[in-house]
Image (cartoon, rainbow, N blue to C red):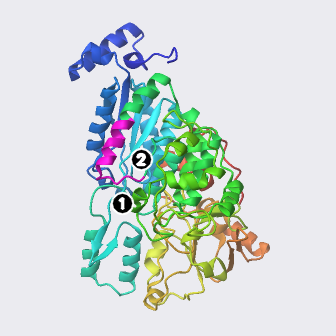
Amino acid sequence: MTDTPSGMRRGLANYGDAGFSLFLRKAFIKAMGYSDAALDRPIVGITDTFSGYNACHRTVPDLIEAIKRGVLMAGGLPVPFPIVSIHEAFSHPTSMFLRNLMAMDAEEMIRAQPMDAVVLIGGCDKTVPALLMAAASVDRPAILEVTGPMITGSYHGERLGACTDCRRFWAMHRAGAIDADEIEAIGDKLAPGPGTCMVMGTASTMALIAEALGMMLPGGAAIPAVNADRLRHAEATGMRAVDIAREDLRPGAIMTEAAFANALRVLQAIGGSTNGLIHLAAIAGRLGIPIDYDAFNRMGDETPVLVDLKPSGAGYMEDLEKAGGLAPILSELAPMLAIDCLTVSGRTLGEEIAAAPAPWPQDVVRPLADPIHPQGGMRVLSGNLAPNGAVIKQSAATPDLLKHTGRAVVFSSLADMAERIDSPDLVVSPEDILILQNAGPKGAPGMPEAGYIPIPKKLAAAGVKDMVRLSDARMSGTAFGTIVLHISPEAAIGGPLALVEDGDQISLDVAAGRIDLLVRESTLAERRAAWRPPAIPNAERGYLRLYLDQVLQAEDGCDFDFLRKVPRREQIS
């Protein structure tokens, strides 16, 4: 340990008398029934992210008990404490709007309360990045545990789960193939129990790349929420938390530039959520590490998608767990990884790969020679429509649409899209390109997962399954289609996306990494001169004001400017 005060002496409240501060603290904590012997142990905080609104975290109380057991077995004192809990479907206006709030809450509570290490319990999409952002900023010994994915459900003999199948069945309902009663019956089977979405959505993506980053004990990413192995992993996490407190092993020693490169490569290989790229940029930014998007594209050129999970493939997370979890993925990628990176286990990534069980026959994790998709899951685009970048999940797109030129059909806002997308009077054809403006970090606000623009109802009814769609919004990692997201700068701050009008020609060329608006510069200059930013109601006070003042664009992780160690990138419009 260092000379930093530990245990109950850490971070005393300021009364002008340190001795009195410690005396008062011990007097009050003894009201919880603790003895002096217990209070002399290393203290391990445990973030309690249970919420009655958060089904992903329904098992958190059980995880806390298992973690506490592990902490006690290793000679520590476990102390759970509550923080913000975010569920994707119960966060208005969006979960992304609240991610930074959760990160700030976790950071300040870890800093304010005496703990020598902290176990971070995440699960639902934004919770893991929020907790890792906090851990990076505090830089106190920290270790991650996740709630784990749901098991799959069944409807009329068909295996299904949240939320790729949610979107598939909803599209069928919109097209008139499934009536209101049947869609309700299907909804009863999509989420059959506690845990996170069981496809390669954002929660699964973040769990896998957090393990690859080195912040979670091996094997933790894919264990289903209801499995006994999940509790055993939590117990081991509690035991290890005491060790990292004694070793003073901090996140900054684990989440290095090389470790982020490993995580980015894994993100490509698993066909992960595009949200993972935003979250990695936010976590890295807290440590002063910029994300090299050109290098990320080069990784994609040499790193194919290996994992056969929806939406890029066919399986579910419990299938990945049965195939060995992250271990066989890391084994395939080992020649391309920085295997000397330290992990929270105290061993290097290479040592963990070597210690993993020998592989067994399975068809979920493919060898490099027989991938699901020949390139990485996503590609970062540039061009005059996205000077600071955009992203597409190419592994979940329609191949014939990856190079396409079409006529723009523009929706100026979420409200405009909701009002007109299903209108029989909408002038649209399958070859057109659907555009959504003002759905970015500031414009919505909160960068909603609205980039999965619905196929107009009259086209869906005619059998159209996919179209090129562009926006400054995000998309759920469970979604699929030829969808360009995170266009930056966003429309609400005057990015080129704001200048697109109905009838403009747009060119998408994913292989070339380009998204371009085919309009003369003189015409764009006229539109730019006439452009006015959209009004955002109720922005005068509170968290919304802080958010709008400080939130950055997607390439900088949508973090708050004042919380990062990396300067923001220059905004090009």
The percent position of residue 504, horizontal first and vertical second, equals 67, 80
- Horizontal side, residue 186 vs residue 286: left or right: left
Residue 542's quadrant in the figure?
top left
Residue 395, percent across and down? 57, 69
Q: Where is the C terminus found, in terms of image quarters?
A: bottom right
Residue 50 visible: no
Left or right, 113 with respect to 264, comes to left
Is residue 296 toward the left or the right of residue 67 in the image?
right
> Where is mark 1, residue-wise?
89
Overall secondary structure of the magenta section: helix
Residue occupying the point 58% across, 56% down: 332
Q: Is residue 306 left or right of residue 288?
A: left
9 in relation to 244, above or below: above
**Mark 1: secondary structure:** helix
x, y percentage for residue 40? Answer: 34, 15
Magenta highlight range: 222-237
343 falls in the magenta region:
no
Residue at 32 percent across and 34 percent down: it is 81
> How many marks do you count on the picture?
2
Q: Is residue 565 above or below residue 417?
A: above
Q: Tell me which amino acid carries mark 2.
A: Gly
Q: Is residue 235 magenta?
A: yes
- Amino acid at the residue labelled 1: Ala
- Nearer the camera: disc 2 or disc 1: 2
Q: Position of residue 477 (x, y in %)?
A: 48, 63
- Answer above or below: position of 342 versus 520: above
Check disc 2 and report the residue beneath it. 220
Q: Secondary structure at mark 2?
A: loop
